[in-house]
């Protein structure tokens, strides 16, 4: 977990000595039980941010918001009714990292993996 800006900066400083092309971080800001694990200031340390909206109960759609540092993108898909969703953020982050390792840019990597991730349910 990366709950503070300081920890993210330490990780960044350590990784600068290696040829890392991209780093995907799942900071887990709020736990499944609703506990706040990281404050909003941590978002300032990231170049791109994907905010998962699948837990919003008032919609038949799952709406995620992606920010690339310049623009916001609304990523919408049908909501899947399931209780088996623990660890899905970690899985999505890993799949995005794998797509980036294949040479994709961030937004296409997010889009293709949202589709694959949804099919996995």
Image: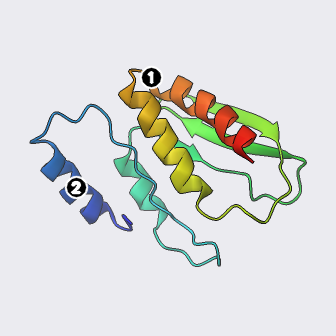
Is residue 83 left or right of 16 when viewed as pictured? right
SS type, badge 2: helix
Question: Which residue is painted at 15% across and 50% down in the image?
Answer: 13
Say left or right for 47 vs 63. Answer: left
Residue 60 spot, x, y in % from top left: 90, 48
Closest to the observer: 27 or 121? 121
Confirm whether residue 69 shows in the render.
Answer: no
Q: Residue furthest left?
A: 17
Mark 1 Cα shell of 10 Å, populated few (<14), some (14-19), many (≥20) = few
| Mark 1 lies on residue | 105
Q: Position of residue 66 (x, y in %)?
A: 58, 37
Q: Residue at x 44, y 22 (%)?
A: 105
Which residue occupies the extreme front position in the image? 120
In this rendering, would 25 be left or right of 54? left
Q: Quadrant of residue 118?
A: top right
Q: Does 89 appear above or below 74?
A: below
Spatial distance from mark 1 to mark 2, Cα to Cα?
Answer: 22 Å
> Where 121 falls versus 71 (above or below)?
below
Q: Which comes before the other along the chain, label 1 or label 2?
A: 2
Image quadrant assignment for residue 116: top right
Instruction: Tell whether label 2 touches label 1 (CB within 8 Å).
Output: no
> Which numbered disc covers residue 11?
2
Residue at the image point whose x is 50% and y is 63% from the top:
28
The spot of residue 9 in percent (x, y) is 23, 55
Q: Position of residue 85 (x, y in %)?
A: 69, 61
Q: Is residue 49 visible?
A: yes
């Amino acid at each position: 977990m990366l709950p503070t800006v300081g920890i993210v900066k330490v990780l960044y400083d350590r990784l600068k000595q290696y040829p890392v092309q991209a780093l995907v971080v799942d900071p887990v800001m709020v736990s499944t039980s609703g506990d706040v694990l990281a404050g909003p200031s941590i978002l300032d340390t990231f170049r791109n941010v994907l905010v998962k909206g699948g837990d919003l109960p008032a919609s038949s759609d799952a709406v995620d918001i992606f920010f690339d540092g310049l623009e916001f993108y609304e990523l919408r898909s049908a909501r899947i009714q399931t209780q088996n969703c623990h660890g899905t953020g970690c899985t999505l982050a890993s799949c995005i990292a794998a797509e980036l390792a294949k040479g994709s840019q961030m937004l296409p990597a997010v889009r293709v993996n949202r589709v694959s991730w949804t099919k996995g349910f």
